[in-house]
Image (tube, rainbow, N blue to C red):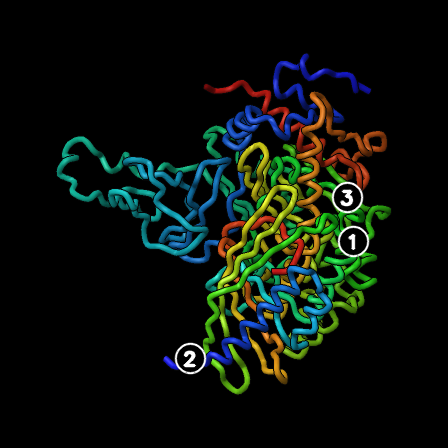
Amino acid sequence: MKTETKVKSINSIADLVLDDRVHKSLYSDKNIFEEELEKIFNNTWVWLAHESELPDAGSYKTATIGRQPVIVVRDRKKKIHVMLNRCRHRGATVCEGKSGKTKAFTCPYHGWGYGLDGSLRAVPKPEEYENILDKAEFGLIKVRTESYKGMIFATLKKDLEPLDDFLGGAKKWIDLFVKQGGGYPLKALGDQRFRFPGNWKIQLENTTDSYHFPIVHKSFIASVDEQAAEVFDFLDGDGFVEDLGHGHSVMVMIPELVDLEDNLDEPIPARYSDLAKQLANEGHSDLEVRRLVRAVGGGGFNLNIFPNIACSMAFFRNLVPISANETEIHHIALGGEGAPEVFNQKRIRIHEHFQGPMGFGTPDDGEAWERVQAGSMAGSDGWIMLNRGMSKLSTSADGNVRGAVCSETGMRAAYQQYKKLMATPSEH
Amino acid sequence: MKLDTQLLADVTAFLNIEADILDNKDYLQWLELWLESGLYIVPVDHNATDYANSLNVAYDDHEMRILRIERLTSGYAVSTQLSEKTVRTTSRFRILDDVDGLVRVRCAYSLYENNKNGIRCYPANLQFKLVRDGDSFKIAEKIVKIMNSSQYLTTVSYLF
């Protein structure tokens, strides 16, 4: 064990990530945070939105790549664009608010007007620009964007591999995750946003940490019926964590809920019997009722996609780095587009029960993360251990490294990608 | 505009008692202020009107109120173990209408919370539906519109 490694002997940030541990300064060092924005967030695919958040021509959502404000928008032909949210004249943002619908983007400062595709359309009092402003060159700056199964990603790095290659082994799990809609296309049903005084990587780790669940979420488990509590008692079950490459990992907690279209003939859990009755009364066939009921509580796994998005059982968790010691989390509730109202309503209630600032789970996670941030300030040197389950690894059918459900395999996967990106020489 | 100062005084007295009960964390007494059919709602989006079909920060019926109180008082939840002290003030009470025994009222609200990060303030607009109950009222609906709920909040381990 290399417990005696001294941080003072380390020359680069990449050296702060070992195979089985990371240095605690990764949580709090302001210079490291600045370098992460450049080498990670400005240098890889970053998730921005789900296509259902932009339902119509003119629908937009504001987001950030690292700390840079961007606009995600659907144009008149329904094509999705991502653009820097910065007027090409004097730099003001041209779009404010979380989301909405517009016909154009107009800078509030001097009135420069841009189309939904970012092209510069109108400049007030243009005569002073005669022969010195070519509007074709002054559209909003486009950001490269690609989507997979409705998940919209963007990257500031022009020569980065295609999104398809970046997602790689994660795609199989996204395909499973989108079955949440119970036979209907996946639809975002709103988000809860909260901040905690801690580093973004603490949240990144948490999505692939089942070890904490029975400890931190004891009060949540106490609030559900016995049958549901049994479902959440997964540490000794057949679950696992797989390293999917590129920093992505999947943590399967409830193997029997991996594919929501399997086992539709299983008995309906008591907690969903009212829902099943309501759906049957509305005239849905037995098969439809079973498909909806099976999907209503979400899937049995967390897919952690590096660096900023997780498909977490039933919702999207999007993390936004604010500073070395502050992170904003968006919990996006999901349902089915056109699905029965009682189904989406039940999914929203289940989401509110655990997630968000007043959920029965999130505040306790938040407290644990805050304690990590505060405690990691103790001592001038020290390591965060990630070695759990390292001696019992195997190879999955897909050829991936696999550890126990409560191993730290997913965290090690994320940090190896982190190390790779942080070791890239600076372009400036 | 005709002012019903007696009703205003009654409503103000009742809602100040509710605020006092919550600051003193006497949650079982708080439950008794409610109609069982009542809804306690903390919306994300202030423009929402169909709360049942919207994502909220909290949407508690009677059963969820009981579960939430058990969570806040059981000692199992790490975020409640260093139980934050709160001080809330209510003011600017206005009766919106009083129809068939149902009084709709709104007021301004500030909650100050002291935790290990210092004092935080949550300004909010409250909306109530109150049903007359003898000399007092029962709460049929409480909607807490926290000013920045559609931007971001920090985690909360008490009741607004």
Q: Which residue is mark 1?
A: B75
Q: What is the x, y in percent for residue A249?
A: 69, 38
Q: Residues within 10 Å of mark 2 (few under 14, many from 20)?
A: few
Q: Look at the numbered disc 1 and give the secondary structure of its residue.
A: loop
- Between disc 3 and disc 1, the foreground one is 1
**Which residue is the extreme one toward the bottom?**
B100
Q: What is the x, y in percent for residue A80?
A: 43, 47
How far apart marks 1 and 2 lie (CA) works out to 46 Å
Q: What is the x, y in percent for residue A169?
A: 66, 39
Amino acid type assigned to the residue bearing label 2 in the image: Leu
Q: Quadrant of residue B1?
A: bottom left
Say yes or no: labels 1 and 2 on the same chain. Answer: yes
How far apart marks 2 and 3 lie (CA) works out to 56 Å
| Sequence-wise first label, 1 or 2 | 2
- Marks 2/3 in contact by CB < 8 Å: the verdict is no
Amino acid type assigned to the residue bearing label 3 in the image: His
Q: Is residue B42 left or right of residue A410?
A: left
On screen, residue B23 above or below B7: above
- Comparing A99 with A260, the one in front is A99
Amino acid type assigned to the residue bearing label 1 in the image: Gly
Chain that bears disc 3: A
Is residue A288 visible in the rendered image? The answer is yes
Chain that bears disc 1: B
Q: Look at the numbered disc 2 and give the secondary structure of its residue.
A: loop
Q: Look at the numbered disc 3 and give the secondary structure of its residue.
A: loop
Q: Which residue is mark 2?
A: B3
Q: Residues within 10 Å of mark 3 (few under 14, many from 20)?
A: some
Q: What is the x, y in percent for residue A153?
A: 51, 41
Say yes or no: labels 2 and 3 on the same chain. Answer: no
Q: Which residue is mark 3?
A: A212
